[in-house]
Amino acid sequence: MARVAKKKAKAKRVAKPAAKASVAASPVVVKAQKAVDAAAKSLDAQLDRVGKARARVQKSNTAAAKKSLTAANAKLREQRAKLAEAKLGLAKANTMDAVRQAEESAKKSVSELAEKLSNKADKELSKALKAFEARWKKTRAKADAKKVKAAEKKATAKVKAAAKKAAAKAKAMEKKAAAKAKAEAKKAAKKASKKKAVKKSAGRPKKAAAKKSTVKKAAARKAATKAVKSAPKKSARRGRPPKATAKKATGRRGRPPKKA
């Protein structure tokens, strides 16, 4: 009986992992653990039957009791094989579940790492974009400043050219106006000179009249001289003839009387 009890205790100790296996979340492991528990339970029951059969053999030692014990022992071996098979199935299930859990854990780790890297990448990208934006803005500001400077230079040159052109135009206009004023002044001077010449020519006939009067006087003197010569000599008086006679002969001196 002591031997049978020992075997029972061993079988019960083998069935202990069932409690641990029942904690697993995998359906395959749960199923394998149930199979192990059932095999262990059947083995315990068979151990009880073997113990009873052995007790009968010891008590009666009959052929029937021995045959029953032999059958019970065969059944016990079968139950032990089933328990061993169930345990193997549980071990396989645990192994596969461990693989699954490792895979899930790896996936989780990879996912967490990916998320962590993604967050880190986002932060680094944001930082890199800010740095790139700062560099780009700086470069663009330099380029724009260069363009503005070139535009200012071009505009200044354009303004200078326009001012030069305007100055040249104004100078040409001043020159033209001066030439026009000079021409007008020359024209006015010429006109004034003509007027003066006309005035002078208008005063000259008086000189002609004076000349005519002189000619008349000379002619009168000549006629008087001729008359004196042709007249009979009254006396042998010397010297100038009387003034009255001379005046009559010579006529009036100075300007001739104006015509009526």
Image: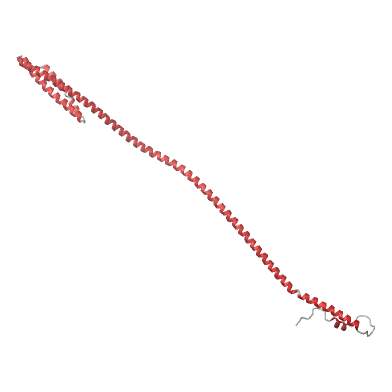
Q: Quadrant of the N terminus?
A: top left
Tell me: 132 left or right of 179: left
Q: Quadrant of the C terminus?
A: bottom right
Placement of 38 over or under 201, stated as above or below: above
Tell me: 249 left or right of 260: right
Residue 39's image quarter? top left
Residue depicted at x 50% and y 46%: 147
Q: Position of residue 169 (x, y in %)?
A: 59, 57
Q: Position of residue 63 (x, y in %)?
A: 5, 14
Give the residue furthest to the right. 236
Residue 25's image quarter? top left
Closest to the observer, 37 or 197? 197
Q: Position of residue 204 (x, y in %)?
A: 76, 74
Placement of 202 over or under 236, stated as above or below: above
Placement of 154 over or under 3, stated as above or below: below
Residue depicted at x 31% and y 32%: 110
